[in-house]
Image: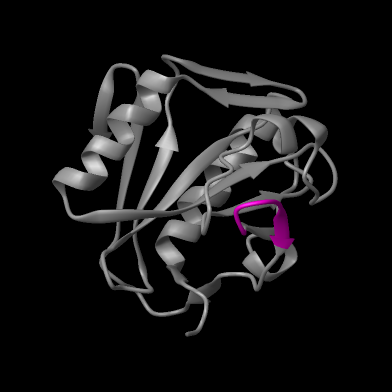
Amino acid sequence: MSPPAIPSALLDRLHADIAHHGALGVESGMFLLARHASNRIDTLALAGTAGVTRHRDHFALSGKALALLFRHARDYDLHVLAQVHSHREGAFLSPSDLRHGFAVEGFTTSVVPNYRRPTRDPASWGWWRYDGRRWASTAPYTSTGAAATAETIVFDERGIRAR
């Protein structure tokens, strides 16, 4: 099976969020969701502010914010495929990522480097998949050049909001 594809419109929104927070000198994070049995990203879930911690080298979400996102995914028949977050410099899994990351078997995480000037191309990000014991490099998601139906939401402890 080929890697999941991210619609161009969602890449634009993802890039804008990372650049916005990068200009403030902090990390950003979001999740990519797809319909069950689909390999095309339908929803970009951007982290809001309530229960969200952003610092220069740290991004964290509260359990409540994550629970609301996963409940939304269940209610709308979506599958959370991957987390994407930014780093100030390189595309690597930091000690904090390895200690506190979303280490669930089969889950994918990606790091967008250089958050002040992030690249829009998923092939230039770092991509890893958790195999149940460790994170292993994996193929990058691709971009769909065509305009596709896609939704952006914002999630945090206050709930889910359309953007």
Image position, residue 45 (x, y; %): 38, 43
Which colour style is shown? one colour
Residue drawn at x 33%, y 28% as measured from the top left: 67
| Residue 58 in view (yes/no) | yes
Q: Could one spot residue 163 in this view of the protein?
A: no
Q: Residue at position x 16%, y 50% from top?
A: 76
Q: Quadrant of residue 16?
A: top right
Query: Which residue appears farthest toward the left when viewing the image?
Result: 75
* Residue 14, percent from left and from top: 51, 49
Residue stretch rendered in magenta on the structure: 131-136
Q: How many marks?
A: 0
The picture places residue 64, in percent across and down from the top left corner, at: 36, 19
What residue is rendered at 45% in x and 46% in y? 31
- Is 43 displayed left or right of 25 in the figure? left
Residue 131: quarter of image: bottom right
The residue positioned farthest toward the bottom in the image shown: 1
